[in-house]
Image: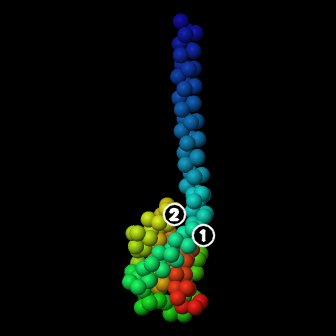
Amino acid sequence: MMTLRTYTSAAIIALALGGLTVRLDAVSQNRDARDRPAANDSHAQFTDGDRQTTKDWYAQHQPHPPAGLRPQDRLSPDQESRLQPGRPLDRDLQSRTHSVPTDLSRRLTPPPANHRYVAIGGHVGLEDRSTHTLRDVIHVHEQDSGR
């Protein structure tokens, strides 16, 4: 009888410790995943297809462009110099951002988690929602401004 109790107790302890080990492993994996950027965040940029799609879309909508892509929305040279991939948008530039029209955003590759497409000063940008960092930019006015 003592042996059966001993084996039962040992089995219960082993199961409890095994469950604890599995739980600790899961916690460790979650912490590791949280501490490193998501795979798609490291590639937060437009594809060549996105660039061509955006320029084609703009060419079709150039007679009546939406806010952020109109001629009167263009940025000053100083503002242009601050619109750089890898840099956060300052408050002035943030105030000039507009959501990209739905029919354009549907044609683009879905943005990475916590990112959005914005129209700003004649450009389409990929912005990190939490840090307001501009990840990439497409200059849509290049073709009509001679740049």
Spatial distance from mark 2 to mark 1, Cα to Cα? Answer: 11 Å
The outermost residue toward the bottom is 77
Residue 137, position in %: x, y? 55, 77
Quadrant of the rendered structure where residue 136 is? bottom right
Q: Nearer the viewer, residue 35 or 93?
A: 93
Q: Residue at x 58, y 9 (%)?
A: 3
Q: Nearer the viewer, residue 138 or 10?
A: 138
**How crowded is the residue under tag 1: few (<14 C-alpha within 10 Å), some, or many (20+)?**
few
Q: How is the image coloured?
A: rainbow
Residue 14, position in %: x, y? 57, 25
Under circle 2, the secondary element is: loop
Q: Residue at x 56, y 36 (%)?
A: 22
Q: Which residue is mark 1?
A: 48
Residue 138, position in %: x, y? 55, 77
Q: Which residue is mark 2?
A: 109
Residue 135, position in %: x, y? 56, 72
Labelled disc at residue 73 = none
Q: Residue at x 48, y 80 (%)?
A: 59
Q: Nearer the viewer, residue 89 or 49?
A: 49
Task: Judge left or right: residue 66 versus residue 11.
Answer: left
Q: Residue at x 55, y 49 (%)?
A: 30
On the question of residue 32 being in view, the answer is yes
Q: Nearer the viewer, residue 12 or 113?
A: 113
